[in-house]
Image (cartoon, rainbow, N blue to C red):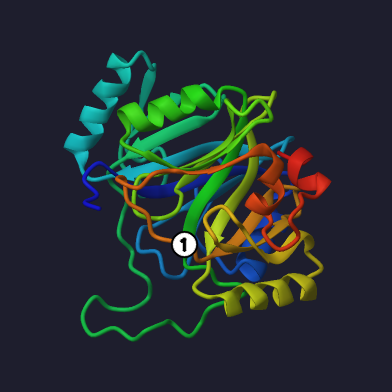
Amino acid sequence: MAITGVLRPGHFQMRVLDLQQSIDFYTNVIGLKEMGRDTQGRVYFKTQDERDHNSFIIREADEAGVDFVGFKVADQATLDKLDADLRAYGVHTERIAAGEMLETGERVRFEIPTGHQIELYAEKTDVGNGMPYVNPEVWVPDAKGINPVRFDHCLLYGPDIDGARKIFEDVLGFYLVEHVLMDDGEADLAIWLTCSNKAHDIAFVRHPEPGKLHHVSFLLESWEQVLRAADIMSMNRVSIDIGPTRHGVTRGTTIYAFDPSGNRFETFCGGYQTYPDQQPIKWTFDQVGPAVFYHDRKLNERFLSVVS
């Protein structure tokens, strides 16, 4: 697939209850690299292998959860066009000046019908991945913790997932990869959308409360690394929700767990390649168990009810 508009998920800002505890967790257990702090009290991270300056930002607050999700677009002209397209579609947008986030260019922010804040941006400083662009080695040997490859996707909970889907499809160029039907056999309970040939770049579940986070996901390179992640979580007494296991949706392998603030995160591997000419995969409500947890073939109560 030729990626010419929205390139990929680019950054994710999350609220935590104890900043220092969270810095220690995301540095030493997850294995992210701290890249800087700003005057607003935000702490910036990236994975070892990401080249842009930051992809994951935390700030201390009284309530855990997600502030916003940012997607990187191809260039400034694309950013301007998508801003105009959103406004023409009836979506209110806000321009946020370059530099408001460390090493990040101008951003276009808007709210979608699930109550979440979404951003688009074109520029973020390339700081590399610790290896040169000429004759590099295959990996940097100073990695800590689980050491994911990249911030991969997030799953958001909110009421109007149909309205959110329309914006992502009609304006931003995403397409539906998989969906789970509700018990009426008509409306969608959950949708998985992509702007690339990944199995998903963002997903939504229908939920009465707006603006909720189910999980933020970090990509690993192999099933063996997912198992190693489980070992590291156990060694550090991390609260594991479920896994290691496999999804039916996307066919990815996974562990869900909670950070010290109660935000759920995922360590994810695999998932098939997809293209926009492929028919979306449909799961009926009676098969939602194997759709989400293929091995257990049923959902645990926490997965449905615990959000931040």
Of residues 241 and 22, the one nearer the viewer is: 241
**Whole-percent x and y of residue 35?**
47, 60
80 relative to 29, above or below: above
Residue type beneath disc 1: Arg
How packed mark 1 is, by other alpha carbons closer than 10 Å (few <14, some 14-19, many 20 or more), is many
**Whole-percent x and y of residue 301?**
82, 45
**Residue drawn where x is 49% and y is 57% of the image:** 151
Q: Using the rendered image of the protein, determine whether residue 112 is visible from the camera's viewpoint.
A: no
- Of all residues, the one furthest to the left in this rendering is 77
**Residue drawn where x is 66% and y is 73% of the image:** 229
Of residues 123 and 97, the one nearer the viewer is: 123
Q: How many numbered dots are placed on residues in this image? A: 1
| Residue 101 horizontal side relative to residue 116, left or right | left
Label 1 element class: strand
**Whole-percent x and y of residue 147?**
55, 72
Q: Using the rendered image of the protein, determine whether residue 125 is visible from the camera's viewpoint.
A: yes
- What residue sits right under mark 1 in the picture? 150
**Residue drawn where x is 50% and y is 66% of the image:** 270
The quarter of the image holding the C terminus is top right
Of residues 107 and 87, the one nearer the viewer is: 87
| Residue 71 horizontal side relative to residue 290, left or right | left
**Whole-percent x and y of residue 198?**
40, 55
Q: Quadrant of residue 121?
A: top left
**Residue drawn where x is 36% and y is 32% of the image:** 169
